[in-house]
Image (cartoon, rainbow, N blue to C red):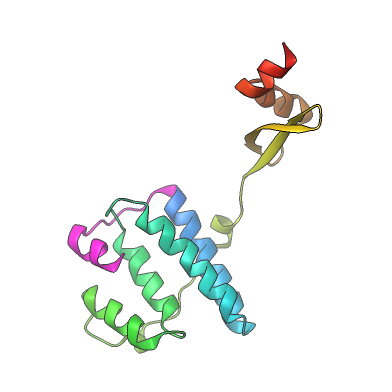
Amino acid sequence: VVTSAVENNVQEMSQETTKILHKTMKKVTEDMEGMSFNTAISAMMVLTNHLQSLDGQVPVEAAEKLALMVSPIAPHLGEECWSLLGNEDSLAYAPWVEYDEELCVDNTVKMGVQVNGKVRGQIEIPKDADQELAMAEAMKESRVEAQLD
C-alpha cells in the first residue's frame, strides 16, 4: 500500500475511500482509547484491503493516515512507512488522525429482499426511504421479478 502511494503519488481520494478512511480513523481512535486493540487492528485491515483493491492508485493521504494509526501497535512499521512516504521527522511528532463525524455516517442502507421466505436479492436505498421506494427498488431485482411472474 505504501509503495503504491509513493510510486504513483495519487493526491485525490474517491468518495468511497474518503468515507472508509474516516470511519477507520474514528474506529481506531475509539478503540485505542478503550484499549480494544484487536478491533482497531481489524478496522485497519479493512482499510488496507480497500486500499489494495485500488489497483496501485493508493492516495498518499490515506497511506499517511494508515501509518499514523498503525504506529501505536507496530511502531517500527509505522516509522518505516512514514519514512518511505517522504517524511523526514519522526511520526511521533505528527498529530494523531482527526476524522470528520459527518463522513462516518452512512446515508444509505443495504436491505435483503425476500419472496416467500427466501432471500432473492439485496437493494441499497437511502436511510429515510419510504416503503414505496423500497418496494420499487426491490421489484427491479431480476430474481424478485422472476418470482412474482
Q: Which residue is drawn at 57% across and 77% down?
A: 38
Q: Residue at x 68, y 26 (%)?
A: 138
- Locate residue 145, reporting x and y percent: 67, 17
Q: Give 92 or 7, whichever is nearer the viewer.
A: 7
Q: Is residue 90 above or below residue 99?
A: below
Name the image quarter holding residue 82.
bottom left
Q: Is 93 in the magenta?
A: no
For the C terminus, the quadrant is: top right
- Locate residue 1, reporting x and y percent: 31, 64
Left or right of 15, for residue 40: right
Q: Give 114 or 125, whichever is nearer the viewer.
A: 114
Left or right of 125, for residue 83: left
Residue found farthest to the right: 116
The answer to whether residue 99 of the structure is visible from this angle is no
- Count up the numbered dots: 0
Q: Is residue 53 above or below residue 1?
A: above
Q: Is 9 in the magenta?
A: yes
Residue found farthest to the top: 149
Q: In this view, does 95 lie above or below 61?
A: below
Q: Residue at x 34, y 87 (%)?
A: 76
Q: Give 143 or 102, whichever is nearer the viewer.
A: 143
- Magenta segment range? 1-15
Q: Residue at x 37, y 64 (%)?
A: 62
Left or right of 25, for residue 30: right
The answer to whether residue 75 of the structure is visible from this angle is yes
